[in-house]
Image (spheres, rainbow, N blue to C red):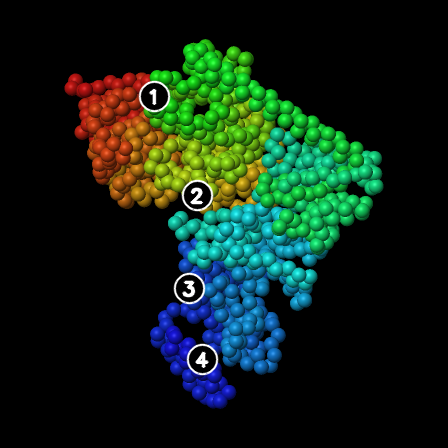
């Protein structure tokens, strides 16, 4: 290639001397290229266009240009995409509003030196660069189009680097490194991002991101022509509506250029190997993605708007929107203002009308002053006045002199602040920010300001008094402790005892690792509160123990979770729940009051919630009628906010892993609170996904990638939330099977109704049609989006909350994770289902590799489409890492292959027994090693589990008789060919005298 390039250069230099020589050298160049370079070129010339099916590849092979068909469309477009990524990601489209309906397209340079797109030899181009060139530039042999390594398609003269036209000046929906957005008034050009219409249509969509040209430049996202989100102006450090830009600057270089006629914002990565892009989505989000090479997928880095407060004008003018104000209304009128429409504001919680000055307020020459509003996104500056060179004090004086000035702030926050911004009308789109917000100085009348300062001073005085009082009490307590140490050692505080002297090292370790302010209750205190865990006080039974109601000595109601002594699996979950709950505080999370860790007793003390758990209502024929649609929708939104807090807003990034109806508790006013964090895991800020060999969870709620591969992420919780959302709407469990219904689970049933346009048929009849059909259909669609089979396609909880609280268009859901899919290809060819009673089968269960005998690993998939003939056929592929379980109304009759070792028998026995199912062990399994002890499990352990789990092994076919007895022979024979689990109350009746 180097020799070819040199040859081309020589031909260009001699162009004016000998055109025949140019032709000869060009022919030689073409021969060399065809002979020695099978790869695609990065250049289009007058003699070398590209046709549909051909590609233009950049020099570093990073980007490709060619014809493509998006999504389910049949139309063809010319676009640029990443060349070496397994997922085709289009970053630019030429003919986005002029598709080609066949494969006859050709992209070439015409006689005027313009790049244009034709099809079917049409004379009128479908798309063209449409630039004006001088006569000398029009020499078409002198113009080329080249795809650069940064993804920019450049039209230029062959003997110069000057660009005549470039795709970076005409962006579509994506902003790449080194690309800019902004405007240039001199040449009347704007660099704007505009979303696709849909995933199948790259035409100009509803959402546009651009800088406003009115007043000081601000970044806006518009929904058609209406402001949707405001990124704000450049304050010297960041755009005021993008506080995370501070963190971005650690990994990328952000360039801002501004003068009277020109504004541009661009970026590039410090680490050039990082692949990143910024996209405006058709759903109304402005998002940054980075390529995760380990997972081979795009990972979202940040997204705007982040919440409802980030939407433009959510609370109207002259108000402050606080997204973290969960206890009351998110909208608050600024000091000296009151709601314009009080009824909408207080009763409907609708803040769009905003606030107005209080009646009779005088803020002109009557001793008024300024109130400091801390850490906010300053108001829309479209009508503000910017003055350079003023200090903050000079800015205050300037604003005070002008009676129309309602507020001021510094224009540039660098070096202590400089410049001045003053607002002379309504203050629109103020948002409380947790960090990187600016201070706004609000004009307030004299009396209002005095009252506010008095209250603030009173609060400060109370805080000082409280601090002095606390310090005095602490000093007295320390003194008393030193003087009476021996006496106090004998007398323990019943409410907060010290760790026992006989506590094990494990107990002390748990106490030392929990929060220092978490109360430790003595065992005696809890026994007194629960009346020795009286059955009358028992609230329910959990996976690792029971929950009891109790009363402390001060009359406070509590709920006590008591870990079962023989629940070895629950100890780690118990410690994990303490460590997590003590650090989490949210109105939709259950509150931990304390714990007990004495000898073998392990207990958690929670706030008592009088309405029990969600499953008590929605799965009970009588109780669920008390839940109207408004209450159900509030529960749906509350759960979503709680999970969003775990995933994003808390100090820790938490994956719950066991989100289900029984783990959602309801307080006296039916506010939902998520509980049971024993299975939860903490993620780092940059951690996207993790893998575990210990799969735990609940059948019906576990995502497929978690149950099958042990991979969990925030999308695992999204799947569980989607199942729970559909259950709340339907009033039925996901695992519930109705007679005459095609699908064996709720997800499959809802999907069938959705595809048939009958989604409302799944709504709980107890609602008696007292609901908004549009809202219910939207919730059903959100639920289906959450349970999509591919985790990448599921929305984040941030997206879910946004979709629930807004009316933006939703993407159509793809097939949910319930169908009998490619997993069947891994089944053992030795299985014979000839004698399976199909009518008794509820679901086919496939589980990942068993690594612990106490694990519970199941995931439901539908077998509604299977026929008896297909069940009788051998399966195509041998299996080495999965087992199969058939969950039945009654135990079916069928032969099974021989288990090969006691560890697998014990593992399958324990797992299947928990589900009252029939487990089958493939013959091809080899020995597994216990990873903790590095030894194989002995047969005695298998016997022990078999006896405690009501497991029987038999070489004959078992029949479940009408009297619920099991006829068997050679009970406990380890060489048997059957492993079957039966319900606990089933009696075992041997049919041979030599039965064990």
Give the crowd class for mark 3: few <14, some 14-19, many >=20 residues within 10 Å.
Answer: some
Residue 504 disc label = 1
**Badge nearest the viewer, 3 or 2:** 2
Q: Is residue 871 left or right of residue 416?
A: left
Q: Is residue 236 left or right of residue 900?
A: right
**Badge nearest the viewer, 1 or 3:** 1
In primary-sequence order, the first of circles 1 and 3 is: 3
State whether residue 380 appears in this view: no
Query: Label 3, on which residue?
Result: 61
In primary-sequence order, the first of circles 3 and 2 is: 3
Identify the secondary structure beneath mark 3: loop
Above or below: residue 191 compared with residue 925: below
Query: Label 4, on which residue?
Result: 9
Query: Label 2, on which residue?
Result: 687
In primary-sequence order, the first of circles 1 and 2 is: 1
Residue at x 49%, y 40% (from the top left corner):
786
């Amino acid at each position: 290639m180097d020799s070819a390039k040199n040859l081309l250069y020589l031909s260009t230099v001699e162009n004016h001397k000998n055109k025949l020589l140019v032709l000869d050298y060009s022919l030689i160049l073409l021969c060399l290229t065809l002979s020695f370079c099978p790869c695609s070129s990065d250049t289009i010339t007058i003699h070398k266009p590209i046709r549909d099916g051909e590609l233009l590849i950049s020099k570093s092979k990073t980007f490709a240009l060619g014809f493509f068909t998006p999504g389910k469309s049949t139309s063809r477009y010319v676009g640029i995409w990443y060349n070496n990524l397994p997922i085709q990601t289009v970053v630019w489209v030429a003919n986005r509003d002029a598709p080609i309906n066949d494969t006859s397209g050709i992209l070439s340079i015409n006689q005027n030196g313009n790049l244009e797109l034709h099809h079917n030899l049409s004379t009128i181009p479908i798309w063209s660069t449409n630039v004006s060139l001088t006569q000398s530039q029009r020499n078409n042999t002198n113009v080329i189009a080249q795809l650069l390594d940064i993804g920019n398609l450049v039209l230029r003269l062959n003997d110069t680097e000057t660009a005549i036209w470039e795709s970076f000046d005409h962006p579509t929906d994506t902003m790449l490194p080194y690309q800019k957005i902004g405007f240039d008034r001199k040449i009347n050009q704007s660099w704007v991002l505009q979303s696709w219409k849909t995933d199948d249509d790259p035409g100009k969509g509803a959402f546009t991101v651009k800088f406003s040209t009115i007043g000081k430049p601000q970044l806006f996202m518009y929904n058609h022509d209406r402001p949707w989100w405001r990124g704000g102006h450049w304050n010297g450090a960041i755009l005021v509506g993008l506080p995370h830009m501070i963190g971005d600057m650690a990994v990328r270089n952000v360039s801002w250029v501004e003068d009277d006629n020109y504004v541009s914002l661009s970026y590039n990565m410090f680490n050039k190997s990082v692949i990143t892009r910024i996209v405006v989505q058709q759903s109304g989000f402005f998002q940054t993605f980075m390529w995760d090479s380990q997972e081979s997928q795009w990972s979202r880095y940040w997204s705007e708007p982040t919440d409802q407060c980030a939407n433009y004008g959510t609370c109207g003018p002259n108000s402050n929107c606080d997204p973290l104000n969960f206890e009351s209304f998110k909208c608050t009128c600024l000091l000296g203002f009151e709601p314009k429409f009080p009824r909408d504001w207080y009763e409907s919680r609708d803040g769009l009308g905003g606030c107005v000055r209080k009646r009779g307020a005088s803020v002109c020459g009557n001793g008024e002053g300024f109130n400091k509003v801390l850490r906010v996104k300053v108001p829309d500056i479209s009508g503000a006045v910017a003055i350079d060179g003023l200090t903050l004090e000079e800015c205050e004086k300037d604003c005070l002199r002008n009676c129309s000035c309602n507020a001021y702030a510094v224009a540039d926050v660098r070096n202590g602040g400089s410049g001045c911004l003053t607002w002379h009308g309504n203050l629109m789109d103020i948002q409380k920010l947790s960090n990187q917000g600016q201070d706004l100085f609000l004009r307030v009348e004299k009396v209002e300001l005095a009252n506010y300062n008095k209250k603030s001073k009173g609060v400060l005085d109370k805080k000082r008094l409280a601090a002095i009082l606390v310090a005095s009490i602490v000093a007295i307590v320390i003194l008393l402790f030193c003087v009476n140490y021996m006496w106090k050692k004998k007398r323990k505080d019943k409410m907060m005892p010290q760790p026992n002297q006989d506590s094990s090292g494990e107990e002390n370790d748990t106490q030392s690792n929990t929060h220092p302010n978490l109360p430790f209750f003595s065992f005696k205190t809890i026994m007194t509160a629960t009346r020795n865990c009286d059955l009358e006080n028992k609230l329910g039974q959990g996976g690792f123990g029971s929950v009891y109601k109790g009363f402390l000595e001060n009359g406070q109601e509590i709920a006590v979770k008591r870990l079962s002594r023989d629940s070895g699996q629950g100890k780690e979950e118990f410690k994990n729940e303490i460590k997590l709950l003590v650090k989490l505080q949210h109105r939709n999370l259950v509150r931990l009051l304390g714990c007990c860790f004495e000898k073998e007793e392990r207990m958690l003390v929670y706030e008592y919630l009088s309405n029990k758990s969600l499953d008590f209502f929605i799965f009970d024929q009588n109780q669920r009628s008390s839940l109207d649609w408004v209450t159900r929708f509030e529960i749906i939104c509350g759960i979503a906010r709680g999970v969003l807090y775990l995933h994003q807003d808390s100090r820790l990034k938490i994956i719950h892993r066991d989100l289900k109806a029984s783990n959602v508790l309801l307080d006296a006013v039916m506010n939902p609170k998520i509980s049971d964090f024993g299975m939860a895991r903490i993620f780092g800020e940059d951690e996207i996904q993790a893998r575990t060999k210990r799969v735990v969870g609940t059948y019906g709620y576990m995502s497929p990638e978690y149950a099958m591969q042990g991979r969990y992420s925030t999308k695992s919780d999204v799947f569980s939330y989607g199942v729970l959302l559909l259950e709340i709407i339907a009033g039925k469990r996901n695992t519930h099977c109705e007679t005459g219904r095609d699908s064996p689970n709720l997800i499959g049933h809802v999907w069938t109704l959705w595809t048939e346009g009958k989604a409302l048929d799944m709504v709980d009849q107890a609602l008696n049609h007292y609901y908004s059909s549009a809202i219910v259909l939207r919730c059903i669609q959100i639920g289906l989006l959450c349970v999509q089979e591919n985790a990448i396609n599921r929305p984040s909880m941030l997206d879910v909350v946004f979709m629930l609280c807004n009316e933006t268009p939703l993407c159509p859901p793809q097939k949910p994770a319930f169908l009998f899919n490619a997993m069947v290809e891994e089944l053992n060819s030795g299985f014979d289902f000839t004698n399976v009673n199909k009518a008794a089968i509820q679901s086919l269960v496939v589980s990942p590799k068993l690594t612990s005998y106490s694990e519970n690993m199941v995931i439901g998939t539908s077998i509604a489409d299977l026929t008896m003939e297909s069940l009788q056929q051998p399966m195509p592929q041998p299996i080495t890492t999965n087992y199969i379980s058939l969950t039945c109304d009654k135990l079916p009759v069928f032969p099974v292959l021989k288990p090969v070792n006691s560890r697998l028998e014990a593992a399958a026995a324990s797992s299947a027994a928990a589900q009252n199912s029939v487990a089958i062990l493939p013959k091809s399994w080899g020995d597994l090693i216990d990873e903790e002890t590095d030894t194989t499990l002995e047969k005695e352990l298998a016997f022990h589990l078999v006896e405690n789990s009501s497991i029987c092994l038999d070489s004959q076919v078992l029949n479940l008789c009408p009297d619920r007895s099991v006829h068997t022979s050679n009970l406990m024979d380890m060489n048997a060919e059957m492993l079957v689990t039966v319900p606990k109350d089933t009696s075992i009746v041997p049919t041979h005298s030599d039965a064990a």
